[in-house]
Amino acid sequence: MRQPLLHDADVVLAAPAQLWSRQDGRLSAPVDGLFVSDVRVLSRLDLTVAGSDVEHVRTDRRGATGIAFTALLRGLDAEQGADPRVRLDRVRTVDPTGLTEVLTITSGRDVPVEVGLTLRLAADLAPMPLVKAGGTRPSARFAVDGRTAS
């Protein structure tokens, strides 16, 4: 196993919690995830929007504990012009106990826009030394609203 590269990771933290992600907000690299007390409690966080690609356009740091991501949702705009009118803003804040993420969809269209969001989460509960060495564990199973997910 090789230690993952960290040069392109965004990190927000409020000890003992820290969140490592890509610049567009994805948790996709081997080191990414939410760590609390040196255990990765969230190893995957994927957001998809039905009917549209999520096109990352901006990342803004909000101090040590927060970060914001802005994306365009061109597929939800009836006009396919140069200036998309539907935007997704994601604001993440880390506190010592974990993570809060607020999603806001803003539309400049003249009609209401229906949006289908899917959020996929996974937790491998890997200790930080294992992650630093490039290792992983199988994702843990958990229940959401009474349904078992993986």
Image (tube, rainbow, N blue to C red):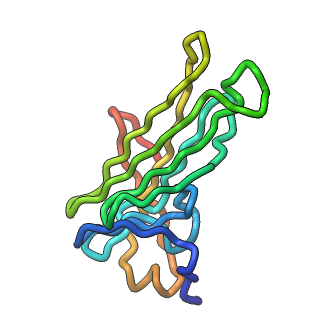
* On screen, residue 45 above or below 116: below
How many numbered discs? 0
Q: Residue at x 42, y 60 (%)?
A: 61
Residue drawn 36% across the image and 58% down it: 62
**Extreme residue in the top direction:** 111
Q: Residue at x 32, y 67 (%)?
A: 64
Tell me if 5 is positioned left or right of 33 in this view: right
| Residue 18 placement (x, y as % from top left) | 33, 69
- Describe residue 20's horizontal placement relative to residue 23 as left or right: left
Q: Quadrant of residue 12?
A: bottom left
In-image side of 84 versus 48 (left or right): right
Res 71 quadrant in image: top right
Q: Position of residue 117 (x, y in %)?
A: 53, 32
Residue 2 to residue 142: above or below? below
Left or right of 65? Residue 104 is right
Please say if 89 is above or below 123.
Answer: above
In front of the other: 26 or 40 = 26
The furthest residue to the front: 83
Could you tell me which residue is drawn at 32 percent across and 54 percent down?
A: 93
Rendered position, 9 above or below 94? below
Quick one: quadrant of the N terminus?
Answer: bottom right
Instruction: Estimate the x, y position of residue 81 in percent, counting from the top left.
Output: 78, 28
Q: Nearer the viewer, residue 95 or 124?
A: 95
